[in-house]
C-alpha cells in the first residue's frame, strides 16, 4: 500500500497524535498501527444527482469514544492526499498539499474539519456515479 513516508514511519512506531482533547469535537482519536491498515472505501453523495460515488481510502483512525471512528482521518491513495469523512452526511473533506508532518504538528484543524468547515469538499471528477444507495436503506 502506497503511503506518505512520514505517515508510514509515524504509524510503524505506534505513535498517536498529541493535542488538547478538550478542543477536539470528537475528543481523543486513536490511530491504527501501520500493520493494521487496509484499503477500503468511503461513499459520497453527488450534489444534484441520485446515487453515490465510491472512493478508495485508507482509514487511519482506530477508535473514538464519541463518534464512529471510521475514516475520521484518512488517506486517499489515488489522490495522494489526506481527508476526513462524515459518515452521517456522506461528505468527504480533503486537505490538498497537506503533509503528515503538518497534521502531526497541529492536528486539531484536521480532526475538527468536518465540524468546523476545514479543508475542501472533495469533488469526485474521475469516479463513476453508482446507482442506488451505499447502505441497506433508502436514500
Image (cartoon, grey):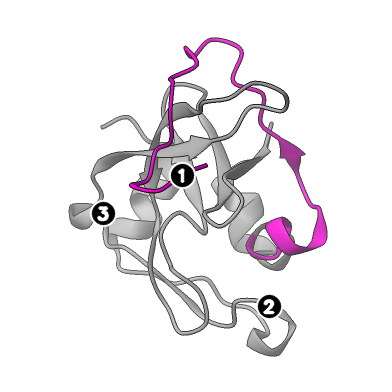
Judged from the image, the secondary structure of the residue bearing numbered disc 1 is loop
**Which of the two residues, 30 or 45, is positioned nearer the viewer here?**
45
Please identify the dominant SS of the magenta region: loop
| Residue 114 included in the magenta stretch of the image | yes
Q: Residue furthest right?
A: 117
How far, Cα to Cα, is label 2 from label 1?
32 Å
Q: Are marks 1 and 3 in contact (CB under 8 Å)?
A: no
Q: CA distance from mark 3 to mark 2?
A: 24 Å
Is residue 102 found inside the magenta-colored segment of the image?
no
Residue 34 in percent (x, y) is at: 26, 54
Q: Secondary structure at mark 3?
A: helix
Residue 103: x, y in percent?
A: 62, 55
Residue at x 72%, y 23% (from the top left corner):
48
Q: Could you tell which of marks 2 and 1 lies nearer the N-terminus?
A: 2
Q: Residue at x 59, y 61 (%)?
A: 104
Please, is residue 105 above or below residue 21 in the view? above
Of circles 3 and 2, the one toward us is 2
Furthest residue toward front: 138
Residue 7 in the image: above or below residue 134: below
Q: Residue at x 81, y 61 (%)?
A: 116
Q: How many marks?
A: 3
- In the image, the segment drawn in magenta is 111-139
Res. 138 mark = 1
From the image, tell me which residue sits under label 2.
24
Q: Nearer the viewer, residue 7 or 110?
A: 110
Amino acid at each position: 500500500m502506497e503511503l506518505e513516508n512520514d505517515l508510514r514511519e509515524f504509524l510503524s512506531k505506534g505513535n498517536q497524535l498529541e493535542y488538547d482533547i478538550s478542543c477536539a469535537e470528537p475528543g481523543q482519536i486513536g490511530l491504527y498501527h501501520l500493520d493494521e491498515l487496509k484499503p477500503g472505501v468511503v461513499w459520497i453523495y453527488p450534489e444534484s444527482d441520485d446515487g453515490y460515488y465510491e472512493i478508495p481510502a485508507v482509514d487511519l483512525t482506530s477508535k473514538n469514544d464519541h463518534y464512529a471512528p471510521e475514516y475520521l482521518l484518512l488517506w486517499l491513495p489515488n489522490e495522494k492526499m489526506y481527508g476526513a469523512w462524515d459518515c452521517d452526511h456522506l461528505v468527504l473533506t480533503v486537505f490538498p498539499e497537506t503533509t503528515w508532518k503538518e497534521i502531526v504538528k497541529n492536528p486539531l484543524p484536521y480532526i475538527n474539519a468536518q465540524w468546523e468547515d476545514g479543508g475542501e469538499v472533495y469533488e469526485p471528477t474521475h469516479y463513476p456515479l453508482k446507482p442506488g444507495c451505499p447502505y441497506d436503506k433508502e436514500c
